[in-house]
Image (cartoon, rainbow, N blue to C red):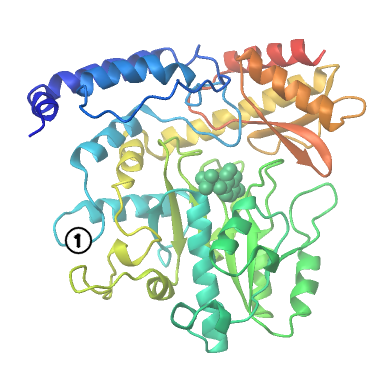
Amino acid sequence: MDPNLATDLARFPDLLTAARDSAMRALAGVGERPAAVAPRPAAPAPLPMRGVGAEAALELFGQRWEPGFSGSAGPRYLGFVTGGATPASVAGDWLAAAFDQNVVTGLDSSAPDLEREAVGWLRELFGLGERHDGAFVTGATMSNLTGLAIGREWAGEQLGVPVSQSGVQALGEIPVLSGSPHSSIYKALSVLGMGRGCVREIPVLPDREAVDVAALESALSTLDGRPAIVVANAGTVNSVDFDDLRAIAALRERFPFWLHVDAAFGAFAALVPEHAHLVDGIDEADSVCVDLHKWLNVPYDSAVQFTHRRDLQTRIFQNSAAYLGFPGQDPDFVHLTPESSRRLRALPAWFSLTAYGRQGHAEIVERDIALARLLGARVEAMPGLRLLAPVRLNVVCFTVTGDPDQQRVDALVRAVNADGELFLTPSVYKGVPALRAAFSNWRTTERDVERIARALGNLAS
Ligand SMILES: Cc1ncc(COP(=O)(O)O)c(C=O)c1O
């Protein structure tokens, strides 16, 4: 055995204690760590020939790389839609690494049953019925890709083409209709061989990002009965708008389409009675995408996909081999997801749901929504800024007053992010250059919002 490996084995408990101390120092300071730091990569180092051992590696990491890491797990990181990691989920994640289960088949471990339990809890949390099965994947992009792949297979079934066997070229174009599709939908369609060009963007309602259902109906009527996929959006990234899922689902009585719902973070509206109506009808979807490293506040990378057509899912993702087994009535996870070997990604989610329950997670969602509204009110009152959309849920979308040209908005984003007090990301809302502040971290409090508002006020004036 390599001498460093042998020493590390002997000193494993000390190593884990040192790693824990290092993690605790980082976590204790995450509230004051700059939300974003200008990337400063360490000077390149050659591939070590003889290693230095894990404790020295920890020291080198601390010197060379850690100073360049952002405070993305902290309370004032409002870029993209970024969750933190609850204490229980961090513990679960560490244990997932320690046990290092490969959740492929149920031949050797009950880990797949733990994943099934976590999926069942999530299904209930988001108001989905038992006809939906699910699996963990790495993120909403993979979850969208999985749902769209099943939709593609369903379209093939309608046309008598087994796509997973004969290939997408045998299928011809399957139109994908959506009001405000997330960019990951285009990426997924490109990977699936359907092409980014198969998306037909349907008009949205005036001053909204939600699809105009009448326009969707009219677009479907032009397809002359050809099967299609409709991507409904439950939580758009700029204004967190929701399509009318029930009205869209009702159109299936007249038109053949697969209904995929991208509820990457909007699904969490189901946890708060005041907002649950926004995802009314989600159970009628054929496939649903929900991200967990966003509002469930588990570490990257984690999402879940749901569908009620596990048979089609298995046709696509089966990975049959004599040594792996073949999909039966209740297929192993190796036959269900784009990944074959898979970490026990369910464990952090299982830990967090066990530790804090529905109530604890609902409190995080409710608080983040209240904080977004508070910042929205502050922004509205600031002389140099104006809201671009009402704060519907957890994102404040705003711009500068006067002519909000791209240069002025970019300059403000740069100044805000260089300041370090908060981090946010730019966007374009209905053609207007914008800034977005997304609240999805369990640590954020009113005091943080006051600090955020103060920093924004100073920089925008
Ligand atoms: C609505 C929506 N869909 C999909 C995604 C893609 O998520 P991920 O980056 O986890 O793949 C996002 C990410 O922000 C999103 O907001």
Judge left or right: residue 162 versus residue 37: left
Q: How crowded is mark 1: few (under 14 residues within 10 Å), some or many (20 or more)?
A: some
Q: Identify the residue at horizontal 67%, vertical 43% (top origin).
A: 240
Q: Which residue lies furthest to the bottom in this view?
A: 160
Q: In this view, does 321 lie above or below 90?
A: below
Image quadrant occupied by the C terminus: top right
The residue drawn where x is 24% and y is 55% is: 113
Taking 43 as reference, is 428 above or below it?
below
Image location of residue 106, percent across then percent down:
19, 61
Q: In the image, is residue 347 above or below residue 188?
A: above
Residue at point 42%, 42% (across, down): 301
- Relative horizontal placement of residue 237, taking residue 366 as reference (left or right): right
The answer to whether residue 439 is left or right of residue 150 is right
- Which residue in the protein does label 1 denote? 106
Above-or-below relation of 393 to 130: above
Where is residue 444? Give x, y as percent: 53, 22
The spot of residue 376 in percent (x, y) is 73, 26
Q: Name the one closer to the observer, 388 or 354.
A: 388
Query: How many numbered discs sit on the rendered protein?
Result: 1
Label 1 sits on what residue type? Answer: Gly
Disc 1: residue Cβ within 8 A of ligand 1's nearest atom: no
User: Can residue 330 be seen in the rendering of this structure?
Assistant: yes
| Secondary element at tag 1 | loop
Asked whether, in this view, residue 352 is left or right of residue 103, the answer is right
Q: Which residue is drawn at 76% across and 21% down?
A: 412
In x, y percent, where is residue 10? 7, 24
> Which quadrant of the figure has residue 233?
bottom right
The reply to whether residue 280 is in sight is no
